Amino acid sequence: MYEGVVGMTDGGPRFRRDPGEIAAIMDLRARRSIDHVTALAWGRTARLCPVCGYRGMFSPVKHKPEIWCPSCDSRPRHRLLKLWLDRDMVLPEGARVLHFAAEPWVRGWFEDRGAEYETADINDLFDLKIDITAMDLPDAGYDMVMSNHVLEHVDDKAALAEMFRILRPGGQAVITVPMIEGWDRTHEDPSLKTEAELRLHYGDPSHLRFYGRDVRDRIRTAGFALHEYVALEPDVSTHALHRGERIFVGRKPAMEGGRKPAAEGGLKPAGEGATDG
Ligand SMILES: [Zn+2]
């Protein structure tokens, strides 16, 4: 018997197939799918990488075609970050920037603009070995803290509170997470424990949740005013971005009558679908 058939409930409808037919269909569809992915894998349309300037076909990542820049290893979220940096980000002079799980190309971008740029994570590969949920850093020392695809791995309430704490008034937290815009609520179930369960529910066994659109509430609850930068056309097609992918930019309020906000007049919501909060 074909092993892919785990079971059949009793009293099912008459139109269902017997295990032998199911095995044949599974085999046919698997082969068609492999042919399709093979055809897609080399890419169909030349794209432009805003990180490195490469123009050409992008490589697949697993089943997803046209994702990876074969010249600099950028993926869609990195290319979106580069577009945001180039177009919409404003830094105060001599800004201090802390970047968790940083991609190598980002350092040069900030240092070319006179920023004091440091990378951080819980391993030894970065400038600072610190835990984003309990940073051994003083209050209000940075103008920007970046965490791209980090919050889904950790206690995000603690991490957002720490990001808020280490920022100067007017400073910015730059946040990206895997999220489903169609979900009201984040899917987070502490009873999921095994690698298979975590992979099934969150897509990755090292993730603790899959965000819904309430990720915005989590960022605001930490005290930030929220802005968003959205992947729209024609950028999506030109640079092989994920449609509707967002960068969340939380700004720590400026002190009353105090220091000028880090991004005063500089940070603007971009394009359709961007919101202020
Ligand atoms: Zn590239």
Image: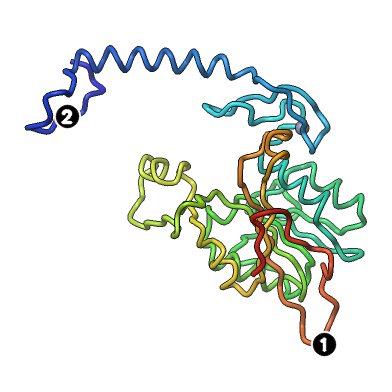
Q: Which residue corresponds to the image point at 77% horizontal and 62% vertical from the top-left? A: 268
- Above or below residue 107? Residue 91 is below
Q: CA distance from mark 2 to mark 1?
A: 69 Å
Q: Name the mark on residue 176.
A: none
Q: How is the image coloured?
A: rainbow
Q: Are marks 2 and 1 in contact (CB under 8 Å)?
A: no
- In this picture, residue 21 sits left or right of residue 156: left
Q: Residue furthest front?
A: 272
Residue 207 lies, in percent from the top left, at 49, 49
**Residue labelled 2 has its Cβ within 8 Å of some atom of ligand 1:** no
- Above or below residue 12? Residue 156 is below
Q: Residue furthest left?
A: 11
Residue type of the residue flagged with mark 1: Gly
- In the rendered image, which quarter is residue 133 located in? bottom right
Q: Secondary structure at mark 2?
A: loop
Q: Quadrant of the C terminus?
A: bottom right
- In this picture, residue 89 sits left or right of residue 164: right
Residue type of the residue flagged with mark 2: Gly
Residue 153 lies, in percent from the top left, at 53, 53
Q: Which residue carries the number 1 mark? A: 257
Q: Quadrant of the N terminus?
A: top left
Q: Which residue corresponds to the image point at 48% horizontal and 56% vertical from the top-left? A: 212
- Above or below residue 247? Residue 74 is above
Residue 196 lies, in percent from the top left, at 37, 40
Q: Which residue corresponds to the image point at 83% horizontal and 70% vertical from the top-left? A: 264
Q: Which residue corresponds to the image point at 86% horizontal and 59% vertical from the top-left? A: 116
| Ligand 1 lies in quarter | top right
Q: Secondary structure at mark 1?
A: loop
Q: Which residue carries the number 2 mark? A: 7
Q: Which is more toward the observer, 49 or 15?
A: 15
